[in-house]
Amino acid sequence: MSEFWLISAPGDKENLQALERMNNVTSKSNLSHNTKFAIPDFKVGTLDSLVGLSDELGKLDTFAESLIKRTAQSVVEVMEDSKGKVHENLLANGGLKEKMKCLKIDLTSFVTHFEWDMAKYPAKQPLVSVVDTLAKQLAQIETDLKSRTAAYSVLKANLENLEKKSTGNLFTRTLSDIVSKDDFVLDSEYLITLLVIVPKSSYVQWQRTYESLSDMVVPRSTKLIAEDKEAGLFTVTLFRKVTEDFKVKAKENKFIVREFYYDENEIKREREEMNRLLSDKKQQYQTSCVALKKGSATYRDHKVKVTPLGNPARPAAGQTDRDREGEGEGPLLRWLKVNFSEAFIAWIHIKALRVFVESVLRYGLPVNFQAVLLQPQKKSATKRLREVLNSVFRHLDEVAAASILDASVEIPGLQLSNQDYFPYVYFHIDLSLLD
């Protein structure tokens, strides 16, 4: 299970014996795996300040967990083509490779082998300062996360808008990746080439009648250059002055002239923009992105459902580049992994602080308690595990212990609901961050 219970009990002889009894029962019954959870001695300050910190840490705990889940979800979105590898990139060290002299630490291992980071969060500082450092760190990560994911969302949206232009039927989709310069009569004062959409059922009629739809149509000038499931795209060349008449006659025969002006510079610009957006999007995940073929009208992950005909220089429908992708990580994925790790590590430190503060408030001064991390072995055993804990530590708070069995009993001064309060200090850690 990816669930942990972080508890504490007073450190006197009686309660240490109670902890030992708990270990024996949970071990023999295979209810949970238990380990000591080391928390340094902090400067306590006044009890009033601890009460305020307790409330602040509760809010910070919720914020940190939310931030971690949002960061993890961003990793999923960036790794949309490799979602099966997401979990192996959600680590407690930024996911740096061994060649960078940093071992990969999975989340469970980090929690079960937790050690307070004295360099980053000095225990000799006042608790308020430690909490402030954590809060500022998480706030900065959230600010950067919003900025980076917003930029990525804009990039994806722009790419999707361009891709929409390259999908759909011949009436609506862009034609820049279908037509070529050879399909048109260009730079002529008298002649113009039109593009006409003809239903597949009317191909024969088109071939038989297009020359007579209007005067001054160039004989044998039509050519089928592309088709989809319903229609084909034909060229036809005629004199400019009969263009409007031809359009009207074509419409009467259910042939639709598609408005299109061949501009080589505009087509080049559109293709380059698609290439750039695809490259930028891919580079957020991998620095070595797919090399797009120069001048190609198709792009990786972009399948055109229109079949170009009669021009071998143009790629076929759905063609994709098979060039091998690089192994490097892109800047966004790298940032997400590093800052997911930073936020996760900060979150577990916040849990440790909450245990310390609540233990002092619950058990009093001088500071003397033992924190233990329990990992329930299976979901079905959690109810039994809770019964064991309540039984072992019932003596710490008889009223609270009784209220667990009788939900109608209220604990004076306690703002939490009864179901969240136990005779011992308890905090929940759930590593199911993508559920």
Image (cartoon, rainbow, N blue to C red):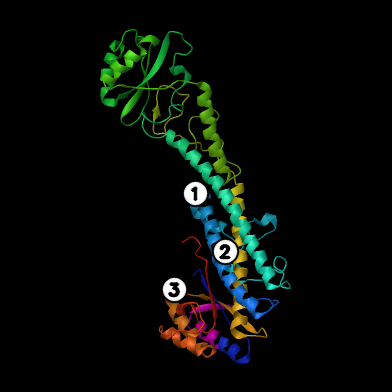
**Pick the front one: 41 or 399:** 399
Task: Measuring from the top left, give residue 153's x and y in whole percent.
Answer: 52, 46
Horizontally, residue 186 falls left or right of residue 9, namely: left
Task: Measuring from the top left, give residue 394's x and y in whole percent.
Answer: 50, 89
Kindly identify which residue carries mark 3: 379
Which three-letter amino acid code belongs to the residue tagged 1?
Glu
Report helix, strand or loop for mark 1. loop
The magenta segment: 21-35
Earlier residue among tags 1 and 2 = 2
Count of labels in the image: 3
Other residues around mark 3 within 10 Å, as few (<14) / some (14–19) / many (≥20): few
**Pick the front one: 334 or 428:** 428
Earlier residue among tags 2 and 3 = 2
Report helix, strand or loop for mark 3. helix
Q: Is residue 325 visible?
A: no
Earlier residue among tags 1 and 3 = 1
Distance from label 2 to label 3 (Cα)? 25 Å
Kindly identify which residue carries mark 2: 64
Report helix, strand or loop for mark 2. helix
